Image: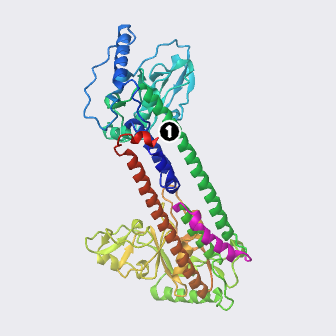
Amino acid sequence: MNAERLLAHYNTIADAPDAVPRLRRFILDLAVRGKLVPQDPNDKPAAELLKRIAAEKARLVKAGELRTPRAIPALSEPPIAIPSNWRWSQLAEIGVLSPRNDAPDTLKASFVPMPLIAAEYGVANEHEVRPWGEIKKGYTHFAEGDVGLAKITPCFENGKSAVFRNLTGGIGAGTTELHIVRPLSVDQDYILLFLKSPHFIETGIPKMTGTAGQKRVPTEYFANSPFPLPPLAEQHRIVAKGDELMALCDRLEAARAGRERSRDRLAAASLARLNARDPETFQADARFALDALPALTARPDQIKQLRQTILNLAVRGKLVPQDPNDEPASDLLKRAAKDIEKYVQANGVRSLKVDHVSNKDQPFVLPSGWAWTRLAGLCRVVTDGDHQPPPRSEDGIAFLTIGNVTAGKLEFTGCRRVPAKYFNSLPAYRTPAVGDLLYTVVGATFGRPVLVDAEEPFCVQRHIAILKPSDQIFVPYLQLVLASPFVYEQAAFAATGAAQPTIALKPLRNFLIPIPPLAEQHRIAAKVDALMALCDRLEANLATAANTRRRLLEAILAGALAPAVDGELAAAE
């Protein structure tokens, strides 16, 4: 293993996705390929070890301690190259499969259910103490030093296996979903390295049998898979080196977690200073946060927090300065009310009463010139799609469902179609038009606003609300308010139903909306666009950096697995 090259680049690749877990799998892979430690020509070859194991089995059979083993099938083509003093074997050849214990019922013994077996290498099994008489029937037997493999999905895929140690009374029983081998003159921990190796697990997954959710590793695969057997002395060296490198992985993982915690604290503190705006320091805080966050953000969820903070500041009047010369929002709301009434009368829409916003309803103090209102006070219509299932048509008008709008834009590809006659029967206020907003009101994706920017005619299902804003409102501002944490919290509170959360139209129409002067709406929307573009660049940079780290990590690991020239393994250590 070229440890020098790996460590030289580790600071670059440490934040690659799954860097440390992949390094752990890499160590296991090297271990069973003979590339983790150098070979020693003075070691007794593995062929001699196999002879000793065969002799020991013969002795146990003759003494009546072991039944005559079944014939072991011949090995197929070796799957990987191994050193010349190793030999291919099988667990059925180097150990006793499914051993049984014989002990008094009163003996205290260990009971090991599946949750007490770890997937990680180096984590010892736990156990419960029970009388042997309670657990000797209906469970899998094992003893001190036996090796167990979880055979059921997803435990097998996750690498659950263990060397059973520190067993009360020296014996134990546990979950029936285990294969057990009792090694003969083979290092138990080397077997464990093999059972946790990517090669063994990935090769075994396609061989699992049974129905979905109940697939199991066949006994034949466990017993007769090609097992790379090193000399016994090298087994011990491999296990020691594996323990050393896994401990290094533990330190690397702890260091990464520490970096993550520090970055999280710094990013959270920067965002908190913005959300708790101090007028005297806000501009400096904002500059610091926007300058520092590119260095502090290492995960997409941190960018999401930044986006939410931007929207939170926007709806509270903290994102751009107020201009005392702007026309106050109260005048805008009066014009909006007249516009809405005119639309209602012209289109035969039922006039909706807008609830008054009292002082006690106001969740926070707005800047001078702003005003509180309800969503219905800003929209000519707040309705939804037709509640009746529409007929289908191969080449009719587009009918959009939640899945066509949850990406934040309209998606017409592959959408349902309805006959033009059906579409034309819908009242105009129930068909979206350019400049309207759609708002999802049902399911796990409720509360997502989408601007209608397509000329193509379409209609929507009842799970999508249609908002037709007054022309006195700057629609991009209303869209960002609807996307803000402030409005989402109202949506979550208004939603009813556990399995399918649903926001009814009445509470939707009564959402509280903070309205700035029209000129400030434009300034806020422009600022949000600029900051969201910055977030887009940060996300793109994160993706690029992650791909770079991933490719570098793969190149380093692939280079270590390449065929070695003479002396290369020794030089690498």
User: Which colour assignment does the render follow?
Assistant: rainbow
Q: Is the magenta stretch mostly helix, strand or loop?
A: helix
Who's the residue at 42% across and 51% down the image? 556
Residue 67's x, y, as percent? 35, 13
Specify the farthest residue to the top: 63
Where is residue 206? Give x, y as percent.
Answer: 31, 41
**Residue placed under numbered mark 1 in the picture:** 120
Task: Rate crowding at label 1 as few (under 14), some (14 to 19) or many (20 or more) other CA atoms within 10 Å.
Answer: some
- Give above or below for 134 relative to 493: above
The answer to whether one can see residue 299 in this image is yes
Q: Relative to the observer, which residue lies in front, 443 or 130?
A: 130
Q: Which image quarter: residue 141?
A: top left
Instruction: Identify the magenta region.
Output: 279-300
Compared to residue 458, the image places residue 184 above or below, namely above
Q: Quadrant of the N terminus?
A: top left
Asked whether residue 179 is drawn in magenta, I would say: no
Residue 288 is covered by the magenta coloring: yes
**Residue drawn at 50 percent across, 39 percent down:** 120
Foreground residue among 317 and 42: 42
In-front residue for pair 561/293:
561
Q: Please state if 452 lies on the left or on the right of 269 as rendered.
A: left
In front of the other: 305 or 494:
305
Q: Look at the picture and state if 442 lies above or below 133.
A: below
The type of residue carrying mark 1 is: Glu
Figure quadrant of residue 128: top right
Residue 79 place in picture, x, y as percent: 29, 37
Residue 154 appearing in the image: no
Q: Residue furthest right?
A: 280
User: Secondary structure under badge 1?
Assistant: loop
Above or below: residue 163 compared with residue 444: above
Q: How many tags in the picture?
A: 1
